[in-house]
Amino acid sequence: MIPSGPYPNGRGAAAARRPAAPSTMAKKFPSDAQALPALTPTRPSKDLQVFANPAPQRDYLIRFEVPEFTCLCPLTGQPDFAHFTIEIVPDRRCVELKSLKMYFWSYRDEGAFHERVTNIVLDDLVRAIAPRFARISADWFVRGGIHTRIVAEHRKRGWTPAPEIALPGPAGDGTALR
């Protein structure tokens, strides 16, 4: 075959500029004996990480929704599912979200009564961040025909919330925005 154009073998300019790989050069692949990195870089953990509250001078509400909480029934070993809502008025510290996710994940294979796990979550958050106010609402899915909702609260000693301000609704119909 006769090459067409200025480049040998008709491979184009880029191929002509690229040096040929020496025959002794071999690609390096990990051997079977080497450990490969874990597919899951994170693991469940009860360690709640915190950071400094960026606005400690004011009360403001942080609301977390955890719609896929899972633990095991301590009597049957079957899974129990809940939707957790966490409302916090922080003081000096806030909880870091990924650590909160890993914290909730850590309950997946643990047996726990609904009332106990709801209160433990509140106690652990209070211990980690010492908020001015915290409310945990756990809405447990129906089990045996019974729907359970558990609400637990913490108020820092001496803290009182600012008075609620009711704003008119968008239509001016007297409906309050909260």
Image (tube, helix red, strand yellow):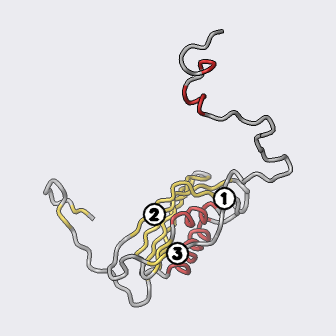
On the rendered structure, is 156 left or right of 73?
left
Q: Which mark is residue 130?
A: none
Marks 1 and 3, Cα distance to the nearest angstrom?
A: 22 Å
Q: Check disc 2 and give the amino acid type.
A: Phe
- In the rendered view, tell whether residue 81 sits above or below residue 13: below
Marks 2 and 1, Cα distance to the nearest angstrom?
A: 19 Å
Q: Check disc 1 and give the amino acid type.
A: Arg
Q: Check disc 3 and give the amino acid type.
A: Val
Mark with earlier residue (1, 3):
3
Q: Which mark is residue 50?
A: 3
The residue that appears at 59% across and 18% down in the rendered structure is 10
The residue that appears at 62% across and 72% down in the rendered structure is 47
Q: Which element carries disc 1, helix, strand or loop?
A: loop
Callout 2 touching callout 1 (CB < 8 Å)? no
Q: Which element carries disc 2, helix, strand or loop?
A: strand
The residue that appears at 71% across and 63% down in the rendered structure is 74
On the rendered structure, is 156 left or right of 100?
left
Tell me the mark number nearer the camera, choosing from 1 and 3. Answer: 3
Q: Residues within 10 Å of mark 2 (few under 14, many from 20)?
A: some
Callout 1 touching callout 3 (CB < 8 Å)? no
Which residue does the numbered mark 1 point to in the structure image?
108
Marks 2 and 3, Cα distance to the nearest angstrom?
A: 15 Å
Q: Residue furthest left?
A: 172
Q: Residues within 10 Å of mark 3 (few under 14, many from 20)?
A: some
